[in-house]
């Protein structure tokens, strides 16, 4: 029954965007010649917003030219407005015979732009819609009476966070800079690392109301053209009123919306973006968030930390194997514990069995309930720790340690072994360098505990098979999610479960970049060696 | 709608779950089982761990194990009857010891072992022993020190002794069943003895003193014919038996010095091969024993720095071992008439046709079997000192 309802919903949601578009097309109008009329239209459009400043001036030799300077307070650099716009118009231009220079071919606006304005980025437009967008992005607008055109001067400036160390993806050795909320700063951070003419950026504005700037970055000639086209298509297909964070974009363009696994990678590190671009991936930077998206994303990518490539290959390989191992623990440890202690006691060594049985004496709850209780308690603690104000964080950690540790065991409600298992699971889930994969595991863990409690190891095995089948069926922008493990590719194993030394990695991942695969030309001289004589 | 039904079906699977799940505090972890024959009924005794008493934290000083007992016409019946007494279901997956009463062993053990081989919950890696002069229940009723679970003490003691003393042999269920069912081989089992005051032995008091009043110890090997106990090997014969069937890992053996006094050889490697041949339509068996060892202890005046002496000692060892082995074989052939060495199997292996001929009357052929014993000994090291400390010359 609710299937048919769902279909109705779909039609409803489809009809909404078309109506907003209708509103948008209403506004699309050209500028008028009359200054007063233009200002009136502006006021009508923007309401009585207090942050829009409209300053009417008169300039010219006899002060006979009426003009309007319009800007958004807080988004515009008032200093440069004062020095380079108002002063120029009201003091310097008096000396210049503007009217003489203005000819039928070159109107006053163009003369102002070419001769008078001492600012860098300046545009001349006639479209009212563009004017509004520019105004709201922080540009200064100059309207002159008698002309149906306007000047747009880019002197945006607003208070923002500087480039600081990334907080979500930290490392010991490596660059300390992270993306900020400013798109231009972010593209600059990447450009500084990749001074390649082939690093191309495509701008898009998404969100009918937020008009969020988005940059799509890729290295032309390395990135797969088909994937670039696919990303472009999916971004253009977005029709929504607002984009506030990369997560919004991610949800709208990802391949598997119902999968617990992320098929789009995110990072707040410019070096990660640069290395992904070099591999032939495509980065999507969004204004207003320090998180950039990278596609296509593979399963193994979530186990790779940028630090893997900055420290020695041997330890990097070891740590990467450790991450896969702790992924397994985070996913299965409580489930295995429940399965073995309630179904397969014969798998335990006798001494361990007796010791576990001794701990369970007097515990009133079945192992399954015990495990669920502890896991949920831990999830609550974790969430509370994230959301609560910093200053009371320490109080919570004391209470938390007490609740899931000592007190629960001493009260005889929870067995000590279960506390160990849950703590180990909790710590293991934090080993993943990318938070997203840890979230996937968090939810799957509960499913596995339920399977274990119902069917024992048999349930876990079936669950694992289903999980692997699901992972193998996923695609990220056409790339098999589990590659290069499935489909298996020998050459790409160099950077999968282990990381070979950089002088051994001659080619880019095969499926990601099908063109221009060679990274180092001469395999023979790549290996560092002391001079022979 | 179809999707709907599938989801419901999957959910209903979860509802049926847990049907064979058991929490750790719902099972009685059984480490030792004793079987006796009492008035034509099986009497089963199980030694169950009291987990909270084993744990250092929660232990209150009461006994670490408890016994449950039940009688029944069959072993399985007795097991199920035990639930009348035991609050938890008997879980025998970690069984370490199966103790058979002497009474039962004399009557035949074959029938009572069926359950242990058939039931999926039993593993076959527990030791089977025979209680000498006692019932199995009495053996399981003695407290032990060091290992506070008696079943563990029995298991570990037999395991250690099996590895470092050639007169004991730990026999696990699957070996026993293979021996009983084999045509050319008879079974043996280790005997277990209870010594001292039984009444004190059953109480905590027993382990509170330095020297326990009652203790459990392994004794000689029990000889079986088919599945019936027919006699006991002496310590010397047990050693001979283990040497023949190649079940010695390491051991020590005292030998006489050339002049007077004794000297102990530490055997580090013993390898024995049983082969058969047919001469004039008569089967013969060769037992070849190769021994490597060190001089472990010298209690006589002897010059070990000479190679001649070493060779002399090797000869003495070879002769003494040969004597022990021959004596053991003689005794088995003439007194018990039980082929515990598997000579029949050896004939079967190398002369299947001959075996087919004599298989039927093997019991009468065995006592007359010609057995040639060869021993070859090599002394490899003499220890960290050369001659005896009291060497005077």
Image (tube, coloured by chain):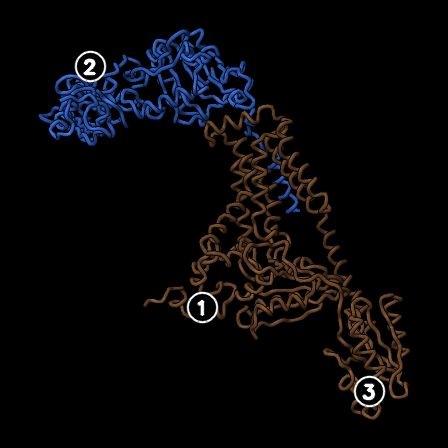
Spot occupied by residue A118 in the image (x, y as percentages of width and height): 76, 81
Distance from Cα at disc 2 to Cα at disc 1: 82 Å
Quadrant holding the C terminus of chain A: bottom left
Distance from Cα at disc 1 to Cα at disc 3: 57 Å
How crowded pointer 2 is (Cα within 10 Å; few <14, some 14-19, many 20+) is rated as some
Give the number of the disc on residue A116: none
Nearest-to-viewer mark from 2 and 3: 3
Q: Quadrant of residue B193?
A: top left
- Is there one chain holding both mark 1 and mark 3? yes
User: Is B151 situated left or right of A207 in this image?
Assistant: left
Which badge, 1 or 3, is on the more N-terminal residue?
3
Give the residue pinned by disc 3. A108
Spot occupied by residue B227 in the image (x, y as percentages of width and height): 31, 17
Give the residue pinned by disc 1. A520
Which secondary structure, mark 3?
A: helix
Q: Colour of chain A?
A: brown
């Amino acid at each position: 029954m609710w299937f048919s309802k769902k279909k109705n919903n779909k039609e409803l949601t489809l009809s909404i965007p078309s109506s907003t578009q209708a509103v948008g097309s209403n506004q699309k109008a050209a500028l008028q010649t009359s200054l007063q009329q233009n200002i009136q239209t502006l006021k009508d459009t923007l309401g009585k917003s207090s942050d829009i400043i409209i300053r009417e001036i008169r300039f010219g030799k006899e002060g006979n030219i009426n003009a309007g300077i319009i800007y958004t307070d807080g988004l515009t650099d008032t200093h440069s407005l004062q020095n380079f716009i108002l002063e120029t118009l009201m003091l310097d231009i008096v000396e210049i015979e503007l009217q003489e220079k203005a000819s039928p071919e070159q109107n006053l606006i163009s003369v102002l732009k070419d001769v008078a304005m001492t600012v860098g980025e300046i545009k001349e437009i006639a479209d009212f819609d563009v004017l509004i967008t520019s105004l709201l992005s922080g540009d200064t607008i100059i309207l002159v009476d008698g002309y149906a055109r306007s000047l747009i001067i880019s002197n945006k400036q607003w208070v923002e966070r500087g480039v600081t160390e990334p907080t979500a993806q930290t490392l010991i050795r490596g660059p300390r800079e992270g993306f900020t909320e400013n798109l231009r700063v972010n593209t600059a951070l990447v450009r500084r690392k990749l001074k390649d003419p082939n690093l191309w950026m495509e701008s898009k504005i998404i969100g009918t109301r937020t008009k969020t700037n988005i940059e799509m970055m890729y290295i032309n000639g390395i990135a797969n053209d088909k994937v670039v086209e696919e990303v472009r298509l999916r971004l253009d297909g977005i029709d929504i009123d607002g984009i506030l964070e990369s997560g919004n974009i991610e949800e709208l363009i990802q391949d598997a919306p119902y999968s617990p696994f992320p098929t789009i990678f995110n990072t707040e590190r410019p070096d990660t973006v640069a290395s992904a671009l070099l591999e032939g991936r495509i980065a999507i930077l969004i204004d207003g968030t320090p998180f950039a998206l990278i596609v296509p994303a593979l399963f193994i990518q979530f186990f790779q930390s940028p630090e893997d490539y900055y420290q020695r290959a041997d330890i990097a390989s070891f740590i990467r194997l450790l991450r896969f191992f702790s992924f397994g623990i985070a996913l299965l440890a409580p489930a295995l514990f429940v399965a073995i202690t309630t179904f397969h006691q014969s798998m335990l060594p006798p001494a361990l069995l007796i010791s576990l049985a001794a701990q369970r004496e007097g515990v009133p709850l079945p192992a399954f309930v015990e495990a669920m209780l502890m896991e949920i308690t831990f999830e609550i603690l974790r969430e509370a720790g994230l959301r609560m104000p910093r200053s009371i964080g320490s109080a919570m950690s004391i209470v938390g340690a007490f609740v899931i540790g000592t007190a629960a065991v001493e009260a005889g409600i929870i067995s000590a072994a279960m506390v160990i298992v849950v703590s180990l699971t909790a710590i293991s889930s934090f080993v993943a360098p990318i938070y997203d994969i840890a979230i996937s595991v968090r939810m799957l863990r509960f499913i596995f505990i339920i399977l274990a409690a119902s069917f024992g190891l048999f349930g876990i095995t079936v669950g694992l098979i289903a999980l692997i089948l699901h992972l193998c069926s996923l695609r990220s922008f056409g790339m098999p999610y589990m590659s290069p493990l499935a489909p298996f590719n020998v050459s790409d194993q160099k950077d999968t479960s282990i990381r070979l030394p950089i002088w051994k990695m001659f080619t880019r991942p095969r499926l990601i970049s099908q063109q221009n695969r060679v990274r180092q030309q001469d395999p023979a001289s790549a290996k560092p060696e002391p001079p022979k004589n | 709608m179809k999707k709907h039904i599938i989801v419901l079906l999957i959910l209903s699977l979860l509802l049926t779950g847990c049907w064979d799940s058991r929490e750790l505090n719902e099972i009685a972890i059984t480490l030792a089982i004793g079987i006796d024959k009492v008035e034509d009924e099986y009497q089963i005794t199980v030694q169950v761990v009291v987990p909270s008493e084993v744990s250092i934290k929660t232990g209150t000083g009461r006994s670490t194990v408890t016994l449950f007992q039940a009688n029944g016409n069959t072993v399985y019946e007795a097991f199920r009857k035990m639930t009348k007494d035991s609050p938890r279901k008997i879980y025998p997956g970690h069984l370490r010891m199966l103790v058979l009463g002497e009474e039962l062993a004399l009557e035949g053990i074959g029938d009572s072992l069926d359950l242990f081989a058939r039931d999926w919950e039993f593993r076959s890696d527990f030791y089977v022993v025979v209680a000498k002069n006692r019932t199995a229940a009495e053996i399981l009723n003695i407290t032990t020190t060091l290992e506070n679970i008696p079943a563990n003490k029995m298991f570990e003691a037999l395991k250690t002794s099996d590895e470092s003393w050639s007169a004991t042999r730990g026999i696990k269920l699957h070996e026993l069943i293979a021996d009983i069912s084999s045509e050319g081989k008879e079974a043996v089992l280790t005997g277990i003895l209870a010594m001292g005051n039984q009444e004190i032995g059953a109480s905590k008091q027993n382990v509170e003193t330095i020297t326990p009043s009652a203790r459990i110890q392994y004794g000689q090997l029990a000889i079986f014919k088919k599945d019936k106990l027919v006699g006991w090997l002496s310590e010397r014969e047990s050693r001979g038996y283990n040497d023949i069937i190649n079940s010695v890992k390491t051991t020590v053996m005292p030998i006489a010095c050339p002049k007077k006094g004794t000297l102990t050889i530490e055997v580090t490697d013993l390898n024995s091969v049983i082969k058969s041949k047919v001469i004039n339509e008569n089967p013969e068996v060769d037992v070849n024993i190769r021994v490597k060892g060190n001089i472990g202890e010298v209690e006589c005046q002897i010059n070990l720095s000479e190679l001649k002496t070493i060779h002399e000692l090797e000869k003495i060892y070879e002769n003494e071992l040969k004597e022990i082995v021959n004596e053991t074989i003689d005794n088995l052939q003439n007194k018990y008439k039980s082929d515990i060495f598997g000579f029949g199997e050896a004939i079967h292996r190398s002369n299947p046709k001959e075996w087919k001929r004599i298989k039927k009357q093997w019991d009468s052929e065995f006592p007359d079997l010609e057995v040639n014993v060869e021993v070859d000994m090599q002394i490899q090291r003499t220890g960290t000192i050369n001659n005896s400390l009291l060497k005077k010359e």
